[in-house]
Structure formats: structure tokens, C-alpha cells
Image (cartoon, grey):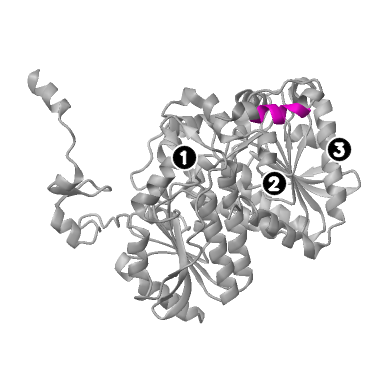
Amino acid sequence: MKVASKRKTSGAKADAAGKKTPTAWEKVALARDAKRPHVRDFIAAMCDGFEELHGDRLAADDPAMVAGFGRIGQHRVLVIGHNKGANVEENVASNFGMANPDGYRKAMRLAKLAERFGCQVVTFVDTPGAYPGREAEERGQAEAIAKSLEFFAGLETPVTVVITGEGGSGGALAIAVGDNVLMMENAVYSVISPEGCAGILWRDGSKAPEAAEALKITAHDLEKLGAIDGIIPEPAGGAQKNPAAACRAVKKAVLASLDALAKTPREELVKRRYAKLRAYGNFF
Amino acid sequence: MGWYEQKKDRAPVPPEKAIWAVCPKCKSHFGKKAWKDAGGICPKCNYHSRISARERIAITADEGTFEEICAGVGYSDHLKFHDASGAYKDKVEAAKAKTGEGESVTVGRCKIGGHAAMLGVMDFAFMGGSLGTGTGERIARACEEAVAKRLPLVIFSASGGARMHEGILSLMQMAKTSAAIAALKKAGLPFISVLTDPTTGGVSASYAMLGDINISEPRALVGFAGRRVIESTIRQKLPDDFQSAEYTEKHGFIDRIVERGEMKAFIARMLDFWGF
């Protein structure tokens, strides 16, 4: 495999900053580290006057998805994010950040309000995936994700996406369609978990490190594939070593994105977003 | 124990030598001729078995009207993906040889009961109908061609989900195809989605569930997550009909279950009613 040569090129920048580039599998562990900042930490560090709002107006309020309005710098924004906890109790309460259909429908409902009132949208993506449960299926998990993709593609207000930890498949993508998709340096983003991929293609879950490498799920690999627009550097050793500094770096990147997108004419926005989505994997 | 070991060692009967056809859904046995005469539709449980893209086109498009577009759009091995059983490139080339198709979906212009339409048909035999970059590109081009020519769009889905061998860009096809469907609807054109057995994962969670109407065939598997994944997550046994088309219709996500023999006429009636 050509992993070694790729590592050299992607590692060069990191080496200049005096850091050693972790392997894809090591990044999976970093991305899942419970001490990493999660959506509520980012909100606390970045937002002034955050007002959380609940419910999808159809069936339920999903604790795995946080949403509410607040200010970041001078911008009025709607923040949406998967709600991963820092410990077992928090995670049981928030279903480990695995959203039900209600979560995606809450996100869409509030994003519609953001559009109406001229607020930008910022999403924080951090989930193992959409919840695989009986009620989730019965309430239309597939339809909720599909609708969300269609909805955000056409939303007439700017959307900044930050993949902060685990970008787990369709459950992540459902709130990761936007104008500027940023990714923290040690986050991962993948079509399937390395364990799931290893179980299917290697028929052995313990081959997850190989699968992680083969799937190309690190920020540097995804930037090269054109799947993301920018990488947010993390403190030495990872965001969990210095969550406050990590939040500052994310705030800086998000503010720059909000400033830039505020200047984009509204009529241009959806056209540009379509062109961007349309170009994904266009090798033909 | 001689009788026991002998039985264990016996090689499975190859399909061409089997006397019986077995319904994959209800496991009932039929004579091969009876199964063939029934057109792959189980005489006992009414399961509509999987058919190839070309068989589907033959029973959907008016004879001689199907004109394939972008047949040259195929897979991309941008990750040079290898797993324990070999290279993705070899597997996808084998799928091409086996099915005679260039990708898991075939798209083109046709007439359905006299109504001009864009038709997309997925083939589960092509790598489990997985959504790769070529698949997504074909679907997006079908949408754009439909908009350009003012044609309604009909897609028959059959897929296990995104094609992991193409990594993140296969996931991105979910966003790309959904955006293309949104543009088609914005142009005032209808999209009829037919979810055939099976339609799950990244395909059900993108264009397949975005039909202005979503139709299914009897007993088709329609869902997001796999049954085993759900059972191991919730540690409960799921009902037998879980994620069947009937179950999904009952929960409000399928408009109608239509028998294979009635499908073409039903689609034509809807297009006619909407003025296309």
C-alpha cells in the first residue's frame, strides 16, 4: 500500500510544528477521547447568550442533538451539534451522540428559523452514527437523514460545519452539508466505522487499524480528496490535552468562516453550495 | 458417527443442478419450473425477488424506447483500496463482467406507457447495488438531464448502501444525489422513487426516500440500519416483518405497495394525472 509515501507528504507540515503525525487508527482513538471538548464545551467557549431550544414539533425532543441560538462575535447564529458526553452518565442521557430521526428534524426545523431571521448556521459534528434502534427505524431514520441532506443543500443561509471528533457516516453527514466544512486536526470522518468495515470486508473486527488506514479518514487525507475545506490545528498531543486552547482555535476558524460567508450574496450561496456538492468525486 | 461426518462433508448443490427453487424470504420450496413460471414472485408469500437492471427496464420502459445516457461513467478507485480478499478494482471489474453493466445504476430516457421520462434502475448484483462515485454521478446527471428536457424522474433502487471501497467520497454521493433531487423538484418536476428488495443504508437515507411518492414491491426489505446491528444494539429480537415494505408503509414512509405486474401501469397513471 502507498500509505508510507502519503504519510510523508501529509506529515511534513505537522513535523514543522514539532508534532508527530499519529496513524489513522491512533486518530480514531484521539477523536473518540472522552476528554475532548464536545458541543456544550464549544458553545460555552464560543457563544454569548446561548438559548437552547427543544423538540421537532412532530414526536419528540432528541437529547442526542443540541440546538439553539446565540452570538459568536458579532454574528447571530443557530448552533446545532451532536451531543456526546464526557462520562457514562452524560452519555447515557444523550445516547452517546447517536441521533434519532427527531434530532435531524429538530435541526431542520430550527435551521428554517435561522433562514427566516437571517442567522447563519454552525454545526458541530461528533457522532458514532445515527442511532440503529427499532423506534428510530419506525419513525423513519432513513427519511430523516435523506430529508436533511436535501434540506441543507437548499437552505438559503450560510452553513459552517466543524467536524470535531467522530464523523460517523450518514448520521454525521445529515448535519455536515454546508458552505464551509472544517475539520479538527485529529477528527475522523468516514463512510463506515473502521470496526464495521473490518467486520464486513476483512471478516474480522480486529483488523480495524488496517481498515482505518485503507478508508482514508483523517483530516489530511480528506482534504486531499476534496471532501473538506479546511483543517483546524489542535494543541500538541490533541484537543483533550488542552480543551481551552482547542476551543479558541475552533472559535477563530469559525469566526473567519462566518465573516467570509456573511459577505456572500444570498442568491449566490445555494448555487455555490450545489456546485460544491456536485463536484464531490467527479472523476468523469 | 460415519453417517454424521459424511453429511457434513457433502458439497452444497450448485444452483444449476438443484431440483428445487427456494424462496429467499419464506424458505418455501417449489419446483424450478413453477418458480420460473411465477416470474420470480413467490407463489406462497408473494415476495418479489431481485431482477437485473435490464430485466427491470424491459418490464418498465415501452419496447425499444430506452436510450441509456452516460454509460461511460464508471467506478473510481481513487483510494487504491485493498482488503483481505483482494483489490477493489478486481472486485468491481468482476461485477462489471458478471452483470454487463458499467455501474450499479443504469440511467436513460424512455417512455413509460407513452409518457416520456428519465429512468434509473439499480442492479443489486453489481456490488450489492452500492452507491459509489460513478453511481452518484449517474443519478445526478439523470436529474440534470430530466431538468434540461423537462422530464419526470423514476428511479428503481436496490442497494445495501454506500460503497465503502470508495471511502468518504461514496458518503458524499448521498449529499450530491439529494441536492440533485432537490434541484429537480425545484424545477417543478416529479420524482417517483421505487424501493425494491433491498433498499437500505446510504441509498434509503438519500435519494430513495426522497420521492414525491415512494413506492415499494411486496415484502421488499426497506430500512436504514441492518437488522443484526439493531438487535445487537438494543439486545432485543425484532418482529419478523420488521423493515418489510408493509411495515414501512404502516409507519408512513411508503405511499403504496405495488405488485410487479401492475407497476408500469401505476407509474404511467400517476405521470398522466400530474400532467407529464
How far, Cα to Cα, is label 1 from label 3?
40 Å
For discs 1 and 3, the disc positioned in front in the rendered view: 1
Q: Residue furthest right?
A: A74
Residue at image coords 45%, 57%: B105
Q: Where's residue B63, x and y in %?
A: 34, 75
For discs 2 and 3, the disc positioned in front in the rendered view: 3
Query: Which part of the image, by quadrant, shows the N terminus of chain B?
Result: top left
Q: Where's residue A9, x and y in %?
A: 71, 30
Indicate the chain on which mark 3 is placed: A
- Where, by quadrant of the figure, is residue A47 drawn? top right
Residue stretch in magenta: A6-13
How far, Cα to Cα, is label 2 from label 3?
28 Å
**Of the residues shown, which amino acid type is indicated by label 1?**
Tyr
**Of the residues shown, which amino acid type is indicated by label 3?**
Lys
Q: Are marks 2 and 3 in contact (CB under 8 Å)?
A: no
Which residue, given by chain and number where applicable, does mark 3 sit on?
A252
Indicate the chain on which mark 1 is placed: B
Which residue, given by chain and number where applicable, does mark 2 sit on?
A54
For discs 1 and 2, the disc positioned in front in the rendered view: 1
Indicate the chain on which mark 2 is placed: A
How far, Cα to Cα, is label 1 from label 2?
44 Å
Residue B39 included in the magenta stretch of the image: no
Which residue, given by chain and number where applicable, does mark 1 sit on?
B88
Q: Residues within 10 Å of mark 1 (few under 14, many from 20)?
A: some
Q: Nearer the viewer, residue B243 or B81?
A: B81
The label shown at residue B97 is none
- Where, by quadrant of the figure, is residue A155 drawn? bottom right
Q: Where's residue A205, x and y in %?
A: 46, 26
Residue at image coords 56%, 35%: A215
